[in-house]
Image (spheres, coloured by chain):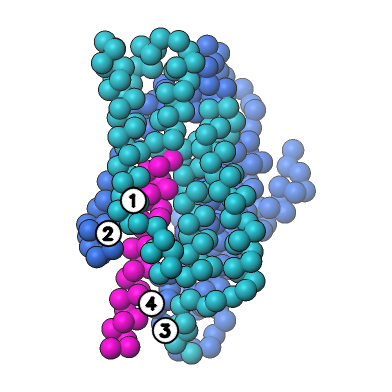
Chain colours: A blue, B cyan
Amino acid sequence: MVSALEVATLVFVLGTALTAALLRDVLGAIIAFAAYSLGVSILWVFLQAPDVALTEAAVGAGVMTILFLLTIVRTVRPPTDDLLESVGWRGVAAGGALSTLLLVTVPSLPAIGSDSPVTTGEVTAYYLENAYADTHVENAVTAVLAAYRGFDTLGEAVVVFAAGVAVLVVLRQEEFV
Amino acid sequence: MSYEDQIPYVESTIIMTTVRVVAPFVLTLGLFVMFHGAGSAGGGFQGGVVVGSVILMLAFAFGIEAVRDWINPAAVLGVIGLGVGTFVAIGLGSVALGGAFLEYGRYGSLTVVKYSIELVELGIGAIVTGVVVGLFFLIAGGYADAEEEGSA
C-alpha cells in the first residue's frame, strides 16, 4: 500500500520538521525548514497533485527561505551555545494535544482512489467529462480554477495584489512609492 | 558572533557561477509552467513564483543593490497592475459581448476560449512575479537602511 520511498519521505519530513522546531540556531532552522518544504512537495507528487507540489517547492523551499534569510540578518543570535531549544512540558502538552486532535481526523479521509464523493461525486465527474469540451483546456485543474471557478481565482489574484500593495504602502520605501 | 557582524552580501564565485548556469533554465521552466498551465501541471501561480525566484537568485548572487538598479521598481508595480488588468479585461470582455462577467463561452470559438484562459493564467503569473520581487526588494531595502544607520 505504502512504498518504501513514501515511508522514507515521511520520515524525512517528520525529521526536518522536528529539526526546524528544535534547533536553537535560526539559520539552521531555516535550512531545515526549506528541506521540510522540499520533502512535503515530494509527498504531494506521491499524492498525484503536481500543481500543489510545484507551488510548495517554489514558495516553501525557494522564496520563503530567501525571505527568512533576509529577515534574520536583522536578528541577534541568542547568547547560549546550546544546540537545541529547551522545551517546557507545557509546550509538549499543547503540541501533543493539537497533533492528537489532527491525527484523529485522518482516518475519516478517503483512501487514494477509493470510491468516495471526492473522487466519484457528481461535480467531479462533470468537470472531468466536460472540461475539455467546454474550454479546450487539457489540464482539468486549470479549467476548474480559471473557468468554472473564475470568480474565486479572480478573488485570489486580487487578494495577492492587495496584499502586495498594502505591504508597499505600509513599508513605504523610496524605491517604490 | 551575532548575525549583525556578518556582511550581508558576499561575492562568491561558486554562487555566481551556479546562478549564471542555472538561471536561464529556471526562467525557461517558469515561463513554460506559466504558458503551458492549460496543457499540463502548472499555471500562473506556480510559474509566477518560479519566474520571480529567478530575480531573487540573481540578487542573491550578484548583490541586491545591483539587481535593484537593473530592474526599475516602477516596472515591478506596473507588472502587478498589468496582471490584474488582464484578468479583469478578460472578464469584462465577455460582458462587452453580451454575456456575464468571465463567461468564456461568449468568446465564440473554443480556441479563443482556450487562449483567454491562457491569458488569465499569464495575468496571475504577472501578479505573483511582481509581488514576490516587490516583497523581496522591500525587505532587503529595510536592512540596507539599518546598515546605513549602523555606519553613520
Where's residue B3, x and y in %? 45, 82
Q: Quadrant location of the N terminus of chain A?
A: top right
Q: Secondary structure at mark 3?
A: helix
- Magenta-tinted stretch: B125-152
Q: Amino acid at mark 4?
A: Arg
State the separation of the CA atoms marked 1 and 2: 10 Å
Identify the residue position indicated by label 1 in the image.
Answer: B75
Q: Between disc 2 and disc 4, whose residue precedes?
A: 4
Q: Mark 2 vs mark 3: same chain?
A: no
Position of A105 relative to A122 (above/below): below
Q: Are marks 4 and 3 in contact (CB under 8 Å)?
A: yes
Front residue of A10 and A144: A144
> In the rendered image, which residue does mark 3 sit on?
B4
Contact (Cβ within 8 Å) of mark 1 with mark 4: no
Q: As shown in the figure, which amino acid type bears the numbered disc 3? A: Glu
Of labels 2 and 3, the one closer to you: 2
Q: Quadrant of residue A28?
A: bottom right
Question: Comparing marks 2 and 4, which lies closer to the viewer?
Answer: 2
Distance, label 4 to label 3, CA atoms, is: 6 Å
